[in-house]
Image (cartoon, grey):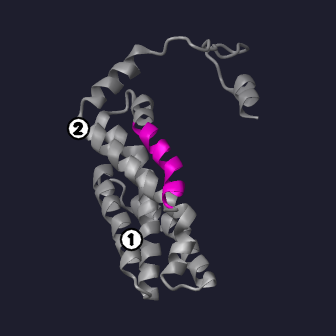
Amino acid sequence: ICAPLHWFFLPTSRPGTRPTRVAVGAPASVAPRTATRSAMHSPAFWLLALSFTAFGFVTSAMATHVIPMLEAKGADPVTAIGIAALIGPMQVAGRSADLLLVGRLRPLAIGAVTVALIPAALVALWASPSALMLLYVFAVTYGMGLGLLTIVRATAPAETFGTASYAAISGALSGPSVLARAAGPLAGTH
């Protein structure tokens, strides 16, 4: 659906002409490659990649296993589903909080909050022998952290490395994370 819409309706430099097509296998621009290589020599690149990879692994495993984990902590099935359903609205709350803080906090400061929220949520889940309140604390903090993580993944590369080659650097940062998200659900079963 999208390809024909782009082909026929995206504006071009001259009215009545189709966008220029790049042949498959054609060399990409040198600038993004150079910027990506330069970014990869920075410890910040590897710290972001490690962080995104770890969070990708955890969040994909949690997406698959959160309800059984809540039940293992003593929640009945209906309560476990209710607590898990709270994570989505808390993502919106986290993003809304970010919207209120735009201009007051830099993306990396929000990233620091995210790095604290998600592990704190997991500690609340792990520490909860059967305390229902801690399971709700888990859902609220995990959901807010997850909502903020989405924003941090989009803004931290631009703040750290600039916007000139944002797509190439962001793609390089996301590669390991994609593999971790694929492995998370399976690894979480053990």
Q: How many marks?
A: 2
Counting from the top left corner in percent of width and height, residue 32 is at: 40, 22
Q: Secondary structure at mark 1?
A: helix
Residue nearest the observer in this picture, 60 or 1: 60
Residue depicted at x 48% and y 43%: 179
Residue nearest the observer in this picture, 14 or 55: 55
Which amino acid, mark 2? Pro
How far apart marks 2 and 1 lie (CA) works out to 27 Å
| Label 1 Cα crowd, 10 Å radius (few <14 / some 14-19 / many 20+) | many
Quick check: 18 above or below 189? above
Which amino acid, mark 1? Ala
Query: Is 13 situated left or right of 146 in this image?
Result: right
Residue depicted at x 46% and y 47%: 180
Quadrant of the rendered image containing residue 16: top right
Counting from the top left corner in percent of width and height, residue 76 is at: 59, 86
Counting from the top left corner in percent of width and height, residue 82 is at: 59, 79
Q: Give the labeled residue for mark 1.
A: 121
Query: Is 93 situated left or right of 47 in this image?
Result: right
Quick check: 45 above or below 106? above
Where are the magenta residues, as a range?
173-188
Quadrant of the rendered image containing residue 137: bottom left
Please report whichever mark, 2 or 1, sits nearer to the chain's N-terminal start: 2
| Label 2 Cα crowd, 10 Å radius (few <14 / some 14-19 / many 20+) | few
Instruction: Name the disc covering residue 43, or none.
Output: 2
Residue nearest the observer in this picture, 76 or 121: 76
Predominant secondary structure in magenta?
Answer: helix
Residue depicted at x 49% and y 69%: 90
Q: Secondary structure at mark 2?
A: helix
Residue depicted at x 25% and y 40%: 44
Instruction: Name the disc covering residue 85, or none.
Output: none
The residue furthest left is 43
